[in-house]
Image: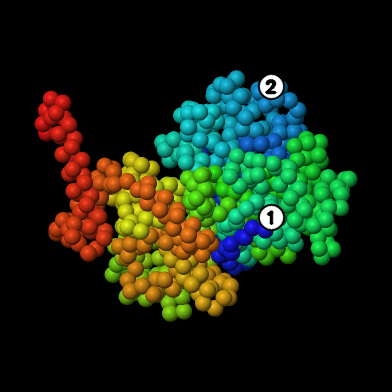
Amino acid sequence: MSNLNKSIPSVSVTYAQNGSANKPNVLGMRPMQERAYERRGEQYLLIKSPPASGKSRALMFIALDKIENQGLKQAIILVPEKSIGASFNDEPLTQFGFWADWKVEPKWNLCNAPGAENGGKVNSVGAFLESNDKFLVCTHSTFRFAVDKFGIEAFDNRLIAVDEFHHVSANPDNKLGLHLGKFISRDRIHIVAMTGSYFRGDAEAVLAPQDETKFDTVTYTYYEQLNGYEYLKQLDIGYYFYSGPYADDILKVLDPYEKTIVHIPNVNSRESTKDKIREVEHIIEELGEWQGTDSLTGFQLVKTSTGKTLRIADLVDDDPIKRDRVSRALKDPLYKYDREHVDIIIALGMAKEGFDWIWCEHALTVGYRASLTEIVQIIGRATRDAPGKNRARFTNLIAELDASEQAVTEAVNDTLKAIAASLLMEQVLAPRFEFNSKNPGSGPEQGFDYGDDGYDPNKCNVGFNEATGQLHIEIKGLKEPKSEEAVRICREDLNEVIATFVQDKTTVERGLFDLEMVPEELTQVRMGKIIKDKYPDLDTEDQETIRQHAIATLNLTQQAKKTILGDHDADNKPSANLALIDGIRKYVMDVRELDIDLIDRINPFSEAYAILAKSISEESLKQVAAVIAGKRVNISYEEARSLTERAIQFKKERGRVPDINSQDPWEKRMAEGIVTLKRYRDQQKAKVNSEGGING
């Protein structure tokens, strides 16, 4: 049997469990729904909210108001796949205090209709547009074909609501994104866009920047969602490394007595054995003795060594009759609140987005997932609140990094991506940061708790508002946003910026394995370039402000994690409630003075490296570092220019240029940047001259 290295959970967050997330107001709205409804008058509304926070019902409230009180003719709800259409089934909202019920005529829920997406269903959309009925539900695909057939103008004066908005992209090849751009340009409809994932299309933007600025955003964070639960108190996220076939060791991370969804690896991944059916059989064999198949549900019955019979749903089997029976049994509303209906679900490409199994305690994913959005969706399956469920976890099981393999590049890439996903999820799960520059006029903000000693005017303070899940942190030398757009980005989009940063392969490689790397090369130069590329229309001062806020958000979370894990290792006890807040407070108290220069001098990946070093062998680590070092190139023209820009700022502040012989590695690196940029420009001049061009 192969050896599975022990792993330290990347992050474990404990929540207050105050029950507020499920408490309705007089209209029957939960907190997220109430927040969204308050913005119901906006023409373009983007709702960013975790899975299970009630986005579907929030849309029902808004859509009813837009038709009854805002003069719109009809509402068309778009879902990415037919199964999610059930989220918009009839709801008796008046029973809970609202002024109208949600009702979709059966013939207008096209997710339930037979036929092809581009056939009769498209004609049904046309019939609906001609009718006096108010609501239609269809897939993204059906809508795309309908717009192609009937044209943009046919949808005037209607609400287009897009569920799972992250499926849209500003890429010209993305038809739905193209259509939405035209709708916004015509400006004759309303749009409500909803997503449970925080990273718009991962590498690609969902909307063109000029379109995105028209949207008013409602954000409800994971922290608010989980903090307001009644039962679920703790969420653990970690990645584990194994060697040999994963099924041999799966029971070291798969607890048969936890309700679990196992996502087996994509057949194209290096973790796959290329025989998915045999992989499922192998997992079942590891769990116990097969007892047959339940005739009603199609679930596999497996008896464990302790005598318990597990009910296992196999969604991997290619036989459509078998798989459909299992799928129907999982969706049967009679068993939605029956904890014993099923114990383990094994899936490949299913049981992710829109899949609702409230009892799931463990989302176990084998192999790296290419999309951060997909990981958020998978984790969302385990973060439902349910009686008796006080802990949930997400585990990413990855083949051990081995630099002797032929596929070394792929192995390194998978590991770097897993680390990036882990860093990002830590940000998503953390409270929201609100930064202020510390100056003589600074003071406490209302509603924030500044610890046992209260607010101290003579130092940088950390305050926490439990009701809103916000941290107020004072930092010396921090720039404040000037423009409205910069304020919005600092408030809404820092996780988007961090997502781009931690997915930048060169950045992660150097942060983890380049021993000569100066942290400011990442925190100032690499992050600075990402901000410039992402927000080219902002002035340089606002770009620098966003850079500082983004790197402070990332590095303070990492330093808090380091503090928590350090304390955890010291006394081997689980972290206390609100440990992340305590960790940040402790870090701020321990440093002599919290300023932006100090934050810029922290390698954002140092703590991830410490965890990696505990999880894989020292020899593997050395081999991989050598591979990364072999790929290192000299300073590029772009980097030299960025370093020179930083050097100009250095001269303004210090009254001298950076010294190439300085003992300070960052000052030395800026000086190297100046020299390198001069060399590039001299080479360019020489080339122009040699080709007979004009000097200068």
What residue sits right under mark 1 in the picture?
A: 248
Q: Amino acid at mark 2?
A: Gly
As measured in the structure, the alpha-carbon distance from the residue carrying label 1 to the one carrying label 2 is 47 Å
Q: Amino acid at mark 1?
A: Asp
Position of residue 676 measured from the top left corner of the image (x, y, whole percent): 21, 46
Asked if one can make out residue 418 in the rendered structure from this viewpoint, the answer is yes
Of 586 and 440, nearer the camera is 586
Tell me the element at label 1: helix
Tell me the element at label 2: loop
What residue sits right under mark 2 in the picture?
A: 119
Q: Locate residue 66: give its quadrant.
A: top right
Residue 200 versus residue 143 in the image, above or below: below
Residue at 83% in and 56% down: 289
Residue at 81% in and 60% down: 304
Which of disc 2 and disc 1 is earlier in sequence? 2
Disc 1 residue crowd, few under 14, some 14–19, many 20+, Cα 10 Å: some
Circle number at residue 495? none
Report whether 633 appears left or right of 260.
left
Residue 464 versus residue 486 in the image, above or below: below
Q: Residue furthest left?
A: 695
Position of residue 497 measured from the top left corner of the image (x, y, whole percent): 42, 49
Residue 528 versus residue 688 in the image, above or below: below
Position of residue 661 measured from the top left corner of the image (x, y, whole percent): 18, 60
Of 297 and 588, nearer the camera is 297
Position of residue 599 measured from the top left corner of the image (x, y, whole percent): 35, 63
Of 63 and 200, nearer the camera is 200
